Amino acid sequence: MQNKVVSLLVGVSLMAAAGSVLAHDSRHDDDRNVLSIAVFGDAPYGLKDSDAAQFDATPAFIGTINADKGISLVFHAGDIHSGKQTCSLAYDQSIYDMWTDPSSGFKSPLVYTPGDNEWTDCHKAKEGGQDPLTNLSYVRDLFFANPGHALSVDKSLFSQADYYDATYPTDAQFVENVMWEQNGVVFVTVNVPGGSNNDEDNWYGAPRTDAQTKEILTRTGATQRWLDKGFAYAEAQHARAVVLMLQADMWDLDGTAQADQHIANYRQYIDNIALHTAQFGKPVLMINGDSHVYRSDNPLKKGSPCFIEPSSPATSGAVAEACTDGIMPGGNPVDPYLTQPYGYNLPNFHRIVVHGSSAPMEWLKLQIKPGESFGHNGPNNFGPFSWQRQVQALP
């Protein structure tokens, strides 16, 4: 792979100059039109290796997205199998083949960011006791073999493999981190895995290795610099909004007793995003998966309303219940999203957790409206963004 080693300022300048050209890759890439994006994650999932129900249903699921002729982009927020299924190159290949099949794959460009189940958690016995870095190389070699290009249908993107700060040459390996401008919005993806708290779970349950420590430090530094560059690019482009996509639900308790314990190793990202959001002053929307339950909220402003899908399968779907008084539906414990914003007061931030793992399968139809920048916010809209859950009753 040929790398274009550029400094931060030069990289942003080059991207700003090229942005107007790249903006014409999509069917609806025009500020006068609504841009519609299909977003999903944590799919397909199985309870064990032999559970192929969602895998087998995925071609029909893809068909429901393709059937919506307004969709011009598809996002996958990570986790292409469950934490109870074995990591393997063969499985990754099967997902790649399904997504990119000329006859039954996606008919719009697909942008994917990796999750913990396909690499950081592969060391766990229930995922086959595999080496995380080997599995990350599988993901990169398959899904990011053509740096700076989307999957299935070609679309030009800026990859960190090509646009990295020469001071940090190891950043060039993060081919999965991309950004681009479209419809006046800058999109940025970063490899931040959930579940293992930024890869903090010691590999194989053994003492921490130098390889794992190096992985965390190298990736975290590259992620921070890519976020910095993304917001600098948004400023240079005079973007009206920023969309961030990463896999981790950085505020999820994930089985821990205290929220502080879980987010300790995400706090650096939260602080970075909060600082840039405050400086940017315009809408910043984050998309993530990881915790599987649809959620719409603002964890960077205390007391902000949140909406979450009901726990009962009979009532799940396009309806979401409001979280009130820091208590989630069903009387669950105090909700750390609402009670611990760490002093932030950022009304121009919003976050969507996409539904995943369980039936029925669903995707989120995210739309960016022309001419809107920051206005009324509700359960299904924020600034120029609006969205609806698309629940799929598949065989």
Image: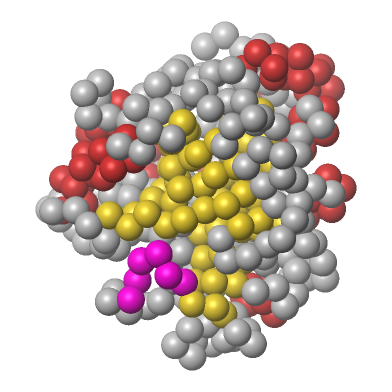
In screen coordinates, is 372 left or right of 389?
A: right
Image: 271 above or below 215: below
Residue at image location 75% in from the left, 46% down from the top: 373
Q: Residue at x 66, y 38 (%)?
A: 370
Residue at the spot 54% in from the left edge and 78% down from the top edge: 322
Residue 367 visible, this orientation: yes
The location of residue 320, given as percent across then percent down, is 46, 72
Q: Is 24 drawn above or below residue 87 in the view shown? A: above
Residue drawn 68% across and 62% down? 377
The total of numbered circles placed on residues is 0
Asked if residue 340 shows in the view, the reply is no
The stretch in magenta equals: 315-320
Q: Is residue 309 left or right of residue 52?
A: right
Image: 74 above or below 363: above
- Magenta stretch: includes residue 147: no
> In this orientation, which residue lies closer to the viewer: 206 or 34?
34
Left or right position of 22 against 8: left
Q: Position of residue 269 (x, y in %)?
A: 70, 52
Q: Position of residue 114 (x, y in %)?
A: 46, 41
- Looking at the picture, the colour scheme in use is secondary structure
**203 or 95: which is nearer to us?**
95
The extreme bottom residue here reads 331
Residue 384: image x %, image y %? 67, 47
Q: Is the magenta region chiefly helix, strand or loop?
A: loop
Q: Which residue is at the front of the view, 358 or 173?
A: 358
Q: Nearer the viewer, residue 391 or 123?
A: 391
